[in-house]
Amino acid sequence: SQSDGVLLTGLKVLNPKYGQNTDGIDISASKNVLVYDCTIDVGDDGICMKSSSSKSDASPRLENIIIAKSTVYQAHGGFSIGSNTDVGMNNIFVTDCYFSGTDIGIRVKSNEGIGGPVSNIFIQNIRMDKIVDEAIYLTSYYENRQVGKTPVVYAAGEGKVPEYSHFYFKNITVDGAETAVKLVGVENAPVHHLYFDNVIITAKNGFIAENATDIIMTNTQFNVAGNKFNLKNTANILV
């Protein structure tokens, strides 16, 4: 947390599946961090990015992060962002990773009050299998429930709003998931400018999006039994 210039390599983090808040590696409000050749098997998020600080600091508090050649087994998310993103994230690069048996493969979550700009996220050369829910999931309506605490509920327009933009997904294969991709933005802050290149996902459900714009797919396949696309309040989706 709040660090600059950190190398994490060869770590093995094991926590029981039933454990609450047992993240593997959390990187919070830090810059210039490399995570390399790590193995995670935990009860909460595997490798997770967070960003929160005083409201007076306008610059991104988390940026220039590299996650490479790492493996995540059971976890809520293989690679996760959030839920705190309120002071921004920029330039995160995830490459050559393997997620097997995680609840969600790539998980981005926040909500009004603790949200902020998350952009320039590069995720490539990822292999996944046996994903329980979504292979790729971005949501601006995450409800953070912690044991013994009442969930915080923010009124519309209160606090900071999540904004996800300029995500680049390239060379990703998924063998088994409930849903290939699910995007849920806020009506006045849609998920926007996402790029999928050579993404091949085998799942029960295809691409689901609500409040999303400007999405481009190249050489991308959703191998599903039913409808490949379920869209609501979306625009400029190029397949």
Image (cartoon, rainbow, N blue to C red):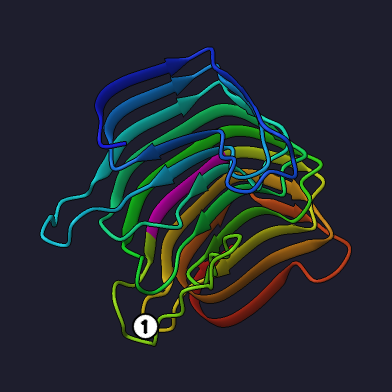
Q: Which residues are magenta?
A: 165-170
Place of residue 226 in the rendered image (x, y in percent of width and height, measured from the top left): 86, 69
Query: In the rendered image of this protein, does residue 194 appear above or below residue 2?
Result: below
Residue 120 in sight here: yes
Magenta-colored segment: predominant secondary structure: strand
- Identity, as a three-letter code, of the amino acid under mark 1: Asn
Place of residue 60 in the rendered image (x, y in percent of width and height, measured from the top left): 22, 49
Residue 219 in sight here: no
Quadrant housing the N terminus: top left
Q: Residue at x 31, y 82 (%)?
A: 158
Q: Residue at x 72, y 49 (%)?
A: 103
Query: In the rendered image of this protein, does residue 135 appear above or below residue 122?
Result: below
Q: Characterize the local packing of mark 1: few (<14), some (14-19) or many (20 or more) Cα atoms within 10 angstroms.
A: few
Q: Quadrant of residue 231?
A: bottom right
Place of residue 49 in the rendered image (x, y in percent of width and height, measured from the top left): 42, 43
Based on the picture, tell me whether residue 96 belongs to the magenta stretch.
Answer: no
Q: Which residue is mark 1?
A: 188
Farthest left residue?
56
Based on the picture, tell me whether residue 166 belongs to the magenta stretch.
Answer: yes
Query: In the rendered image of this protein, does residue 99 appear above or below residue 159?
Result: above
- Position of 154 with respect to 38 (left or right) is left
Quadrant housing the C terminus: bottom right
Place of residue 223 in the rendered image (x, y in percent of width and height, measured from the top left): 81, 54
Q: Residue at x 74, y 45 (%)?
A: 18
Farthest right residue?
225
Farthest top residue?
10
**Along the line of sight, the residue nearer the viewer: 222 or 107:** 107
Q: Quadrant of residue 84?
A: bottom left
**Along the line of sight, the residue nearer the viewer: 201 or 161:** 161
